[in-house]
Structures are given as C-alpha cells and as structure tokens.
Amino acid sequence: MYHIYMTKYDQLAKIFFEFSYRDEMLGIPFKPRAYQLASESMSALKNQVEDAWHKGGIKALKELPGIGQSTAEKIDEFYRTGRIKEYDKMKKEFPVDIWGLSRIEGLGAKHILDLYKHLKVKNMDDLKKALAKHKVAAIPRWGTKSEEKLARGLDLMENASGRRLLGEILPVAEEIVTTLKKVKGVKHCVVAGSIRRMQETVGDVDLIATTDKPDRVMDAFTKLPLVESVHERGKTRSSVRLKIGIDADLRVVPDKVYGATLQYFTGDKRHNVLLREYALSKGFTLSEYGLFRRSHGARSAKPKLIVCKTEEEIYTALDMDTPPPEIRVGDDEMDAAREHRLPDLIPYGSVKGDLQVQTDWTDGEASIEDMAKAAEAAGLEYFAVTDHTKALAFIHGLTDKRVIEQGKHINQLNKKLRGFFILKGTECDILKDGSLDLTDATLAKLDWVGVSVHSHFNLSRAEQTKRLIKAIANPHVDCVLHPTCRLIGKREPIDYDFDEVLAAAKKHRVAMEIDSLPERSDLNDQHVRAAIKAGVALVIDTDAHAPEHFGFIKLGEAIARRGWAGKSDVLNTKSAKQLLAYLAKKKRT
Ligand code: DGT
Ligand code: CA
Ligand code: CA
Ligand code: ZN
C-alpha cells in the first residue's frame, strides 16, 4: 500500500476494496458490501474526504455517503498516522496484491484465495508463471476450463488497458446502433457508458436496447459482420469482441425500465454513487434495476418500482434537473442539478467555421478549393487556411513570401466561391524564445493569426510559461492552437503555468483553441472550464489535414460541453461577418 504515486483517497479506496475481498474470503456476511461502498465513496469524493476529516474528524466523516463508524475510524487513523494497523497486519498474513489481481474479469475473492493457498500466487507475475506451466488446472475444483477462462481474462485485461480514442470508436458504435434499430421489435437502441458521455478515450462499447423479443436483437448483435468473437450470449446481456479490437456489451431490458437502465449504464460510476446516495436520502433506492420508493408503514412491504421510461423521469422524481451525459462526472454537476442551475451547454452543430485547416500548400492532402467544398458539405460556412510556417522545414512550412502569395490566391477563390468564405490565416510557429516565425508586417495582412508550439517541448516550466506569454503579447495574435501539445498515449502536455498563460490571454484578448483531432483533444475539459472562469474566449477547430476530417468538429463540441461551455463562450459560433467584425474591433481598441 502506501504507494507514493497514489493520492490518499485512492489509497483509501484500495485499502477498503482489499478489506472487502478479505471479508468475503473469510465468509463474513454483510461486511464486504460495507467496505465496497466505502471504497466507492473514496473514489467518488476524492479530496472532500480529507476536507471533512480536517473540519470535523470522525463525526464529519460519518456524515459522508457510504461511511460508518468503523470505516470512519480507519480513515481517521490513516490521516493521523499515514497507516492503518489492521491493514498492515492483513498484508503480513496475506501478502497478495488483491487490488491488482481483481482487475481480471471473473477473478473473485475466493479464486484469489485458492491461487495463493495452492500455488503461492501473490501478484500478476506469479499468476502468469503459474498459467504458463498449466498449474492452475490442478487446483481442486478448477480444471482446464477454468484455467483457460482465467488466461483469457488476463489477455483481455492486458489488451483492454490500452484505452481507445473516442474519435476512432464512436463511428463504429453509431453503425451498430443503426443496424440494431432496424431489428423487428426493437423500440430503443442507444450507446451508453463513456461513449455517451463523449469521454476522450473509451474502454469498451456499452449498448442498450429495449424489446419484448430479446432473442432477435441478440442474434443480430452477435452476428454483426463487425464482430470477431462472442464472449457470451444471454437473454439480457451479450458481450462480443469487435474486429477493431475492443469489446462491446449489449443489454436488453423491457421498456418500463429503459430510463433507469440508460441512467445507470451511462455513468460515470462516481455520478451514480452520488446519485444513489442522494436517492437514499430522499426515501428511494436506485440501481440498474430501477428507482424504487421505500415504504414507510408496513415493514414487510416491498419497495415499489417507479416506472421511468426516460432518464428525465428519474431525475425529476428526485427533484433534480437532468445533467447532460457529458458533465456526469460525480462532481459539482450534482449540486447544479439539485439547485436547478445547470449550464446551457453549447449545442452540437453550433460551430459555423473552422479556424485551423491545413492544405496542400504544406502538409495537408487537398487543395484549398477542395477543402472548402468538403467543409461546406460538412455544414460549415467558412474556414481559415492555417498552413504551418517555415520553422517546420520538413513539411515545407510557408515563408513570409509564400504566405502573401497564398493570401492573393485566397482573394481570387473568394470571388469565385458562392456561400462559403475563406479567411486568410496561419498556424505560425512559436520559436524557442517566444518570438514568432513570420514578421509583424506579414501577420498584419492576415484575418486570423493562430500560434502554436512544435519544438522545444521540454523547456523548464518557467521558460515555457515565459515563451507562451511572449507569443500571446504580440498584438497580431488571435489564438493559441492546440495549447498543451499533448498527444494521447504518445506525448505528455508541455509544462507551463496554465493560469498565468490564461491571464495573459485574457489581457491580450487571445483565444484558446479546442483542437478536435482525436489524439489531440487539446484543450481538454478541465482546461476549458479554467479558460471560461478566466474570461478567455474559446475556439473549436478540427485541425483538418484532409477533407474527411471536418467530421471531427462534433468531438471538439463535446469537449466544450464537458467543460461547461455555452455557445457564447466559443468565438466561431459567430458567422464569418460577425467574427471579422469582432477581430477588427479587437485591433482598433
Ligand atoms: P470505460 O468503459 O472505461 O470507458 O468507462 P464506462 O464509464 O463506460 O464504464 P463501464 O463500461 O465499466 O460501465 C458502464 C457504466 O456502468 C458506468 O459508466 C457506470 C455503470 N457502472 C459500472 N460499474 C459500476 C459500479 O460498480 N457501480 C455503479 N454505481 N455504476 C457502475
Ligand atoms: Ca464502457
Ligand atoms: Ca462496459
Ligand atoms: Zn500544429
């Protein structure tokens, strides 16, 4: 335990989780569930746990959802001494990485106990060795079938730890929904889970359908051409591996519990934990099986199912507004929903123009004209051409001279095009010292100046901060593009003081971009909230390098929504005319 890279609340979540498994191994009734709830609460409440403890010790802890006297005492001991004696004792007697091993699908407490008792398996490595030598099958009551299942579970877990980009999986999920909706007898079919919440990466595809004839839709699902293999086919749940290398689950329920099922499987888990606790406090119980009213009078009376055909009916029954899925993270959306002050999020389809587009003048695939046609077909009214500048020599970044030439070409195109407008722009490189790759004279001739970092990612925090602020202070600059430079799974964000940079952006009226390219997703939701709080304008772009990339815009809109942005927070929800007027006014004043 006591892992230095784990936050304190994550350590507590792990400790309680391991206690719950221990008690299950020992066959202690009821207690495992209490520890499991306590563990979920730690993950849900995060720093609120420590705050409560600072304010009111054990008494305040007990007021938190899922925390009773005994768990409160342990939390208190942990914050006071940094350890929990009972946990140390357990680890001495049973030195097994329960937390790690439990991540394998189907590996419960009793299995972990068996593996330790018979094969001295303490961790994942030991387990792999035991499996390689086919020792697992020899455990009493296990056999080759169980051994194979465990090996499959381990494989699955190792593959699944690589989360996939939303932009890659969303179209596949949508295709499955379209197909299953056509199955006879299917009333609803939707995507739930992290995909419905439009999280930047997803672990698997969760689908929900309602029908009175589950067999038909289960057949259609397990026989989809997209399916590689079937893990499990049941009446209420089937699970498959898709050819693109991700699992998909389909749950089939009757229409009268559609609302509760959709709510539960949309998550996220923390949101569900908090909502369940709130429901309890109002005299209800809430689970994947529905919303029930607890009876007061007769003790024996069964809780009564409240039919919720939609999610809204659940939240309404609890006297809450329904938070859009994108903001269900188990944080302040709960209070906002209870106090009827949820934000008006930017609707999908609000962005009118794309302000980061590359063409075949540099590393884009298509001509300016072909990109314009594609953008128009995707529903946009305008875009800015923002080819890279000369510092990126390997992709023939534009010199000042070429930028001016390109501007003349764009003027010609604008005369020719009807109903679509092209802004003259740039994605100008921010050099190491914060100066820009084009002269001020060139920048002055452009409608839209985006700046971004493509080199020297590893400067010290102080230097990187200074570099960005210097670029932002150039009076020609309109926007910082892909501001953190992270690439999901490939490159960490560059390190600078984000708040200081936001303050400079506010002062110089420079916007910050949400780059919708799936592996960038940069800014992310947290940054978006910070930018709005700091009074900095946002822009949603696709960073298109090819005609088909304009479809990414809705991913950027999703990030904005997850960051609580409204339509007026985003500059390019304006028409081209309004935007140009805004930029002109900014230059004058
Ligand atoms: P993912 O798949 O890792 O991208 O994330 P999700 O959110 O799709 O998670 P997943 O697929 O494990 O489960 C789908 C939803 O089901 C999740 O968002 C909330 C609900 N859920 C799953 N496990 C639990 C749980 O242990 N407790 C509660 N309250 N809800 C859960
Ligand atoms: Ca999922
Ligand atoms: Ca799932
Ligand atoms: Zn770039």
Image (spheres, rainbow, N blue to C red):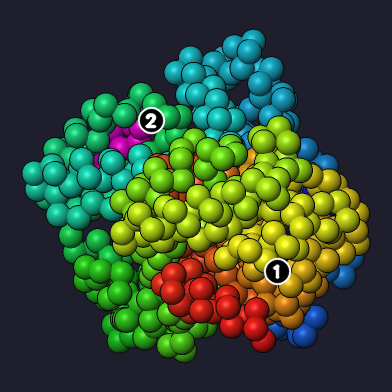
| Mark sitting on residue 433 | none
Residue numbers of the magenta segment = 231-240
Callout 1: helix, strand or loop? Answer: loop
Indicate whether 563 appears above or below 247: below
Indicate whether 234 appears above or below 492: above
Indicate whether 388 appears above or below 522: above
Three-letter amino acid code of the residue under disc 1: His
Which of label 2 and label 1 is nearer to you?
1
**In the image, what residue occupies the spot 31% across and 78% down?**
293
Residue 281 visible in the displayed image:
no
> Along the line of sight, which residue is nearer the eye, 97 or 501?
501
**Left or right for 157, reference 230:** right
Three-letter amino acid code of the residue under disc 2: Leu
The residue indicated by pointer 2 is 242
The residue indicated by pointer 1 is 476
- Marks 2 and 1, how far apart at CA: 49 Å
Q: For residue 290, what is the image quadrant?
A: bottom left
Considering every residue shown, the one lying at the far left of the view is 184
